Image: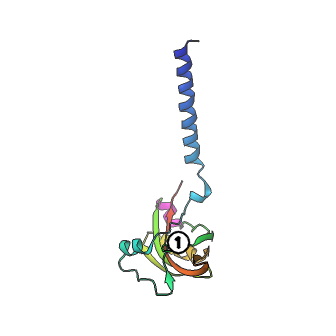
Amino acid sequence: MSKGRIALVLAGAVVLTLAAGFVSVRVFPLKGRASGLETVILEKEVAAASPNVTPAPPNVYTVGNGVSAPVPIYKPEPPYTPEAKAAKIQGSVAVQALIGADGNVTNVTVINHFDKGLTQNAVDTIKTWKFKPAVKDGKPVACKVRIEVSFKLF
């Protein structure tokens, strides 16, 4: 076999391998990416995104300036509603929430709504999440965060 033919066969094998990998990832996504993923951002970004969200009380912190972000330790995925599945709706719901010093979620305020009952499912599910609380000076503190839940059908 000539060098050119060997190179062509190897290039074809690489392309087929990459295509098979791409198709596998699209058909069988990782479970954690199936319908929800949270994003925690700074309070300033929350205020810029939604001016009607109330600022944090004095004993509630925001991430930064010596305050670590709360870490989710229990976060079930919010369910799709039958109406949203039938309509094949995909998108995100963003909320602002207070994560207490005990790691529980309280005071959930919707920043951007979504259709067909998905906003309510996101809020109800987020209220069940548990976090390792934010820490300031080695002590757990209450922290206001932004959480975004993505609804995707694969």
User: What's the image's color scheme?
Assistant: rainbow
x and y percent of residue 94 in the render?
46, 70
x and y percent of residue 77 in the render?
59, 66
Q: Which residue is mark 1?
A: 122
Residue 84 sits inside the magenta stretch: yes
x and y percent of residue 24 in the render?
59, 43
The amino acid on which the numbered mark 1 sits, given as a three-letter code, is Ala
Image quadrant holding the N terminus, namely: top right
Residue located 53% across and 68% down the image: 81
Q: Nearer the viewer, residue 34 or 131?
A: 131
User: How many callouts does the rendering have?
Assistant: 1
Q: Nearer the viewer, residue 94 or 44?
A: 44
For the question of whether residue 59 can be seen, the reply is yes
How busy is the neighbourhood of tag 1: few (under 14 within 10 Å), some, or many (20 plus)? many
x and y percent of residue 125 in the render?
57, 73
For the question of whether residue 99 can be seen, the reply is no
Tell whether 58 sits left or right of 100. Answer: left
The dominant secondary structure in magenta is helix
Tell whether 83 sits left or right of 135. Answer: left
Residue located 45% across and 83% down the image: 56
Q: Nearer the viewer, residue 136 or 146?
A: 136
For the residue labelled by badge 1, is the local secondary structure a helix, a strand or a loop?
A: helix
Residue located 59% across and 70% down the image: 71
Q: Nearer the viewer, residue 29 or 51?
A: 51
Residue located 52% across and 79% down the image: 143
Residue 135 sits inside the magenta stretch: no
Quadrant in the picture for residue 140? bottom right
Q: Report the magenta residues as a range.
A: 81-87
